[in-house]
Image (cartoon, helix red, strand yellow):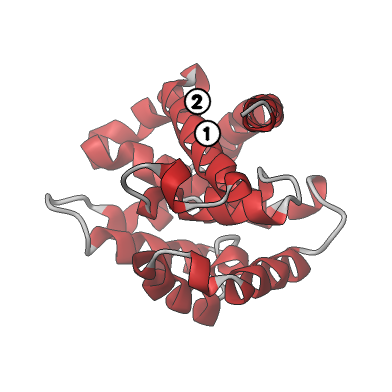
């Protein structure tokens, strides 16, 4: 659910961003369903998720959350990282977070016919609530985490996860600061690799 990070890690390549944004909503053969640049974005999304899930700093952060949130610690950590990216956006981009978010929403609106209906149903709520900006506030975190908790099969305690963030923000920010530069470097390299692979087809 960390949409902001996936958008940012598309490095201003519009169709790659579309694919990166919808990665969780795509099933089946990606290359048969989408044009190459969107397919690259979907593959990049999955590579980013795997890198994140297996990174030692992320695992360390998850251990901090596990006593309260158990199996949902990874989901919550992802959402927390979007909080820090949105809140400290100026450290990563010259545009304001508001300008960036509007560019993303406009891009999706212009390409709706290419995107899965399941994603577009969620996107309506995302745009209306300006999630990419709202992620950077505790109220936004409360809303996001409460919304995700309604989709969980087991008791998640996610409705209180914004309070955990508030109580441990300095420590959690430390994990983000250690992890995110690695993710940026990895994502740039992986995008270059994927682009070369598709160019050679």
Distance from the alpha carbon under mark 2 to that under mark 1: 5 Å
Q: In the image, what residue occupies the spot 63% across and 32% down?
A: 198
Q: Label 2, on which residue?
A: 51
For the point 38% across and 46% down, the residue is: 76
Secondary structure under the numbered disc 2 in the rendered image: helix
Q: 122 above or below 91? A: below
* Most distant residue in the left direction: 154
* Position in image of residue 10 (x %, y %): 67, 46
In-front residue for pair 62/38: 38
Q: Quadrant of residue 107?
A: bottom right
Q: Is residue 115 left or right of residue 37?
A: left
Which of the image's four quarters has the C terminus?
top right
Instruction: Look at the numbered discs 2 and 1 and tell me whether their residues touch, using CB distance below 8 Å.
Output: yes
Q: Secondary structure at mark 1?
A: helix
* Residue 62 in view: yes
The circle on residue 48 is 1
Residue depicted at 50% across the width and 52% down the height: 34
* Residue furthest right as drawn: 94
Please identify the quarter of the rendering in which residue 100 is found: bottom right
Residue 170, x across and y down, in percent:
59, 39
Report if residue 84 is visible in the image. Answer: no
Q: Residue furthest top?
A: 56
Rendered location of residue 59, percent (x, y) = 41, 23
Check disc 1: other Cα within 10 Å, few if <14, some if 14-19, many if 20+: many
3 w.r.t. 142: above or below: above
Q: Tell me the residue at 34%/67% (across/down).
A: 118
Between 96 and 26, the residue placed more toward the observer is 26
Return the x and y of residue 31 as percentages of the image width and height.
Answer: 47, 42
Image quadrant in which you'd find residue 177: top right
């Amino acid at each position: 659910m960390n949409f902001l990070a996936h958008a940012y890690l598309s490095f201003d390549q519009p169709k790659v961003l579309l694919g990166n944004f919808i990665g969780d909503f795509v099933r089946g053969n990606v290359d048969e369903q989408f044009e190459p640049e969107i397919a690259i974005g979907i593959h990049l999304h999955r590579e980013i998720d795997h890198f994140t899930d297996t990174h030692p700093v992320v695992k360390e952060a998850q251990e901090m959350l596990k006593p309260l949130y158990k199996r949902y610690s990874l989901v919550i950590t992802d959402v927390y990282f979007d909080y820090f990216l949105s809140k400290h956006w100026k450290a990563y981009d010259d545009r304001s977070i508001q300008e960036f978010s509007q560019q993303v929403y406009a891009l999706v609106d212009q390409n709706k016919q290419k995107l899965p209906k399941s994603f577009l149903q969620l996107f309506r709520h995302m745009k209306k609530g300006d999630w990419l900006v709202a992620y950077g506030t505790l109220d936004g975190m409360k809303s996001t985490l409460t919304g995700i908790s309604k989709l969980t099969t087991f008791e998640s305690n996610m409705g209180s996860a914004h309070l955990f963030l508030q109580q441990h923000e300095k420590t959690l920010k430390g994990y983000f600061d250690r992890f995110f530069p690695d993710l940026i470097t990895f994502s740039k390299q992986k995008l270059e690799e994927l682009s070369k692979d598709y160019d050679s087809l």
